Image (spheres, rainbow, N blue to C red):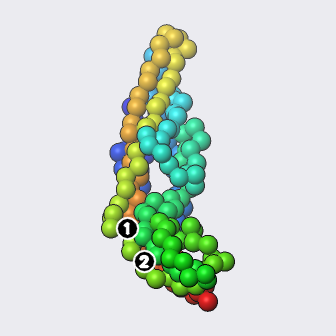
Amino acid sequence: MAFTPVGPLLDTVTENFAFSHVISYTGVDSLGTPVSYNVTLTANEPNPNTIIINANAISGYYYGQFPATIQYLTTDNQYVIVNSFNQIDVSKLREVIYYKASMVTSKTYNYTAVATYTDPTTLVTDTQTQVYQIVLMNDWSSGITSLKSYVGLTV
Protein backbone atom coordinates (compact mmCIF):
# COMPACT_ATOMS: atom_id res chain seq x y z
CA MET A 1 0.00 0.00 0.00
CA ALA A 2 1.68 3.28 1.01
CA PHE A 3 3.75 5.29 3.42
CA THR A 4 2.33 8.53 4.75
CA PRO A 5 3.57 11.11 4.06
CA VAL A 6 4.58 10.21 0.53
CA GLY A 7 8.36 10.52 0.13
CA PRO A 8 11.11 10.97 -0.51
CA LEU A 9 11.07 14.69 0.45
CA LEU A 10 9.81 14.98 4.00
CA ASP A 11 10.56 18.66 4.56
CA THR A 12 12.66 21.68 3.63
CA VAL A 13 13.68 23.78 6.65
CA THR A 14 16.15 26.43 7.73
CA GLU A 15 18.26 26.40 10.89
CA ASN A 16 16.38 27.05 14.13
CA PHE A 17 13.05 26.17 12.46
CA ALA A 18 11.19 23.59 14.54
CA PHE A 19 9.51 20.73 12.71
CA SER A 20 7.70 17.52 13.56
CA HIS A 21 6.62 14.56 11.42
CA VAL A 22 5.05 11.18 12.05
CA ILE A 23 5.56 8.39 9.51
CA SER A 24 2.95 5.68 9.04
CA TYR A 25 2.34 2.78 6.69
CA THR A 26 -0.98 1.17 5.85
CA GLY A 27 -1.11 -2.19 4.16
CA VAL A 28 -3.57 -5.07 3.94
CA ASP A 29 -3.59 -8.39 5.73
CA SER A 30 -4.23 -11.80 4.14
CA LEU A 31 -7.99 -11.16 4.31
CA GLY A 32 -7.70 -7.84 2.48
CA THR A 33 -8.37 -5.77 5.58
CA PRO A 34 -6.40 -2.51 5.92
CA VAL A 35 -3.84 -2.70 8.74
CA SER A 36 -1.31 -0.31 10.23
CA TYR A 37 2.28 -1.49 10.18
CA ASN A 38 4.80 -0.81 12.93
CA VAL A 39 7.17 1.86 11.65
CA THR A 40 10.68 2.63 12.88
CA LEU A 41 12.62 5.64 11.64
CA THR A 42 16.42 5.81 11.75
CA ALA A 43 18.90 8.48 10.72
CA ASN A 44 21.26 7.50 7.90
CA GLU A 45 23.95 9.95 9.06
CA PRO A 46 24.80 11.73 12.32
CA ASN A 47 22.29 14.34 13.42
CA PRO A 48 22.67 17.17 15.92
CA ASN A 49 21.35 16.46 19.42
CA THR A 50 18.46 18.85 18.73
CA ILE A 51 16.86 16.22 16.44
CA ILE A 52 14.80 13.61 18.28
CA ILE A 53 13.72 10.35 16.66
CA ASN A 54 11.24 8.29 18.62
CA ALA A 55 9.98 5.16 16.82
CA ASN A 56 8.09 6.56 13.82
CA ALA A 57 8.34 10.26 14.75
CA ILE A 58 11.01 12.89 14.14
CA SER A 59 11.06 16.37 15.61
CA GLY A 60 13.39 19.16 16.57
CA TYR A 61 15.46 21.74 14.75
CA TYR A 62 18.87 21.96 13.14
CA TYR A 63 21.43 24.33 14.61
CA GLY A 64 25.05 25.08 13.78
CA GLN A 65 25.19 22.87 10.72
CA PHE A 66 26.96 25.42 8.52
CA PRO A 67 30.31 26.24 10.15
CA ALA A 68 31.61 29.76 9.71
CA THR A 69 35.03 31.32 10.25
CA ILE A 70 35.11 33.91 13.01
CA GLN A 71 38.14 35.75 14.29
CA TYR A 72 37.92 37.81 17.44
CA LEU A 73 40.22 39.78 19.70
CA THR A 74 40.26 39.00 23.41
CA THR A 75 40.57 41.45 26.28
CA ASP A 76 44.21 40.32 26.68
CA ASN A 77 44.93 41.11 22.98
CA GLN A 78 44.93 37.54 21.68
CA TYR A 79 43.46 36.72 18.27
CA VAL A 80 41.28 33.62 18.30
CA ILE A 81 39.67 31.82 15.36
CA VAL A 82 36.55 29.67 15.90
CA ASN A 83 33.96 27.94 13.69
CA SER A 84 30.86 28.95 15.59
CA PHE A 85 29.64 31.90 17.61
CA ASN A 86 28.93 29.67 20.60
CA GLN A 87 32.68 28.89 20.75
CA ILE A 88 33.46 32.53 21.57
CA ASP A 89 34.40 33.15 25.19
CA VAL A 90 32.19 36.19 25.75
CA SER A 91 33.88 36.98 29.06
CA LYS A 92 37.07 37.71 27.07
CA LEU A 93 35.54 39.18 23.92
CA ARG A 94 36.89 42.60 23.02
CA GLU A 95 36.07 42.80 19.31
CA VAL A 96 34.82 40.66 16.45
CA ILE A 97 37.48 41.09 13.75
CA TYR A 98 36.35 38.83 10.92
CA TYR A 99 33.31 36.78 9.98
CA LYS A 100 32.90 34.56 6.94
CA ALA A 101 29.67 32.60 6.56
CA SER A 102 29.63 29.09 5.17
CA MET A 103 29.15 29.11 1.41
CA VAL A 104 27.30 25.78 1.56
CA THR A 105 23.72 26.49 0.50
CA SER A 106 22.06 23.31 1.78
CA LYS A 107 22.53 19.92 3.42
CA THR A 108 20.36 16.87 2.95
CA TYR A 109 19.67 14.53 5.84
CA ASN A 110 18.38 11.05 5.00
CA TYR A 111 16.18 8.87 7.17
CA THR A 112 15.01 5.32 6.56
CA ALA A 113 11.53 4.25 7.59
CA VAL A 114 11.04 0.51 8.00
CA ALA A 115 7.44 -0.72 8.25
CA THR A 116 6.73 -4.27 9.41
CA TYR A 117 3.62 -6.31 9.94
CA THR A 118 3.21 -9.97 10.81
CA ASP A 119 -0.10 -11.37 9.61
CA PRO A 120 -1.64 -13.32 12.52
CA THR A 121 -3.40 -15.71 10.14
CA THR A 122 -0.45 -16.69 7.94
CA LEU A 123 2.41 -15.64 10.29
CA VAL A 124 4.10 -14.08 7.27
CA THR A 125 5.97 -10.87 7.99
CA ASP A 126 5.89 -8.10 5.41
CA THR A 127 8.57 -5.40 5.49
CA GLN A 128 8.50 -2.17 3.50
CA THR A 129 11.10 0.59 3.43
CA GLN A 130 11.11 4.23 2.39
CA VAL A 131 13.98 6.71 2.47
CA TYR A 132 12.97 10.23 3.46
CA GLN A 133 14.95 13.42 3.10
CA ILE A 134 14.96 16.65 5.04
CA VAL A 135 16.70 19.45 3.20
CA LEU A 136 18.29 22.03 5.46
CA MET A 137 18.66 25.36 3.67
CA ASN A 138 21.32 27.85 4.70
CA ASP A 139 19.57 31.20 4.61
CA TRP A 140 22.39 32.83 6.62
CA SER A 141 19.90 34.48 9.01
CA SER A 142 21.28 32.60 12.01
CA GLY A 143 24.80 33.91 11.34
CA ILE A 144 23.56 37.44 10.74
CA THR A 145 21.64 37.45 14.02
CA SER A 146 24.62 36.02 15.93
CA LEU A 147 27.03 38.50 14.35
CA LYS A 148 24.84 41.41 15.44
CA SER A 149 24.56 39.99 18.96
CA TYR A 150 28.27 39.35 19.41
CA VAL A 151 29.32 42.70 17.98
CA GLY A 152 26.94 44.24 20.52
CA LEU A 153 28.76 42.38 23.34
CA THR A 154 32.15 43.90 22.56
CA VAL A 155 33.75 46.15 25.13
- Which residue is at a point 52% across and 33% down the rendered structure image? 39
| CA distance for labels 1 and 2 | 10 Å
Count of numbered badges drawn on the protein: 2
Q: Quadrant of residue 138?
A: bottom left
Image side of residue 89 versus residue 2, left or right: right
* Amino acid marked by disc 1: Ser
Dot 2: what SS?
Answer: strand
Q: Callout 1: 10 Å neighbours few (<14), some, many (20+)?
A: some
Q: Are marks 1 and 2 in contact (CB under 8 Å)?
A: no
The extreme bottom residue here reads: 155
- Which residue is at a point 37% across and 67% down the rendered structure image? 102
* Amino acid marked by disc 2: Tyr
- Which residue is at a point 41% across and 28% down the rendered structure image? 128
- Which residue is at a point 58% across and 85% down the rendered structure image? 94
Residue position for label 1: 102
Image side of residue 133 versus residue 150, left or right: left
62 up-or-down from 88: above or below: above
What numbered label is drawn on residue 68? none
